[in-house]
Image: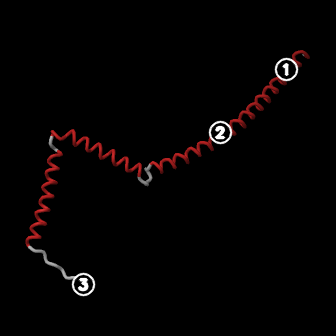
Amino acid sequence: MTERKQRTPAEIIAETEAKLDRLLVKQAKKKALTDPTLAPLVAELDALRIEIREARKGLGSGPQSFDARIVKHEKWIVKIEEDRIIAHSHLSDAEERKAAIEAEITATVSSMVNTSKEISFGA
C-alpha cells in the first residue's frame, strides 16, 4: 500500500487559484456570449457546431451514417426492382385476360345480334 502524501498549503493554494482562474474564464466566456457586439460571431459559432455535428454523424458508424443510409437505400432499390418485375408480369397477365374477355364479349354480342336478325327475318 502506498503512503498518502499530504498536500502542502502552497499546493492547495496553487490548485485553488487554478480552479478560480478556470471559473473566471468560464464566467467571462458566458458573459461574452451575451454581448451584442459578439452576437454575429456567436451565431456563426452555433451554426458551425451544428455543421460539425451533422458531418460527424454522417461520417460515423451509427444508423444515420452515410454508409448505413446507402445500405438502406440499396435494399429499397432492390425491393423496387422486384416490384417492377412483378408489375410487368401482372400487366402482361391482365392485358391477356382483358383481351380474352373483350373477345368473348364481342363474340357473345355478335351471336346475339345474329340471333336477333334471324328472328327478325324469320318472323
The residue at the point 52 percent across, 46 percent down is 73
Query: In terms of depth relative to the viewer, which is nearer, 29 or 87?
Result: 29
Mark closer to the observer (1, 2): 2
Which of disc 1 and disc 3 is earlier in sequence?
A: 3
Judge the density around disc 1: few (<14), some (14-19), many (≥20) Cα neighbours within 10 Å: few
* Distance between mark 2 and mark 3 Cα atoms: 77 Å
Location of residue 79 with respect to 100 vertically, above or below: below
Label 3 belongs to which residue? 1
The kind of residue on which mark 3 rests is Met
* Position of residue 96 measured from the top left corner of the image (x, y, whole percent): 75, 34
Question: Which of the 4 image quarters holds residue 25?
Answer: bottom left
The residue at the point 14 percent across, 42 percent down is 35
The kind of residue on which mark 2 rests is Ala
Mark closer to the observer (3, 1): 3
* Distance between mark 3 and mark 1 Cα atoms: 117 Å
The kind of residue on which mark 1 rests is Ser
Label 2 belongs to which residue? 87
Label 1 belongs to which residue? 116
Location of residue 110 with respect to 72 vertically, above or below: above
Q: Secondary structure at mark 2?
A: helix
> Relative to 94, is 79 on the left or the right?
left
The residue at the point 22 percent across, 41 percent down is 41
> Relative to 1, is 73 on the left or the right?
right
Quadrant (top left, top right, bottom left, bottom right) of the N terminus: bottom left
* Position of residue 59 measured from the top left corner of the image (x, y, whole percent): 41, 50
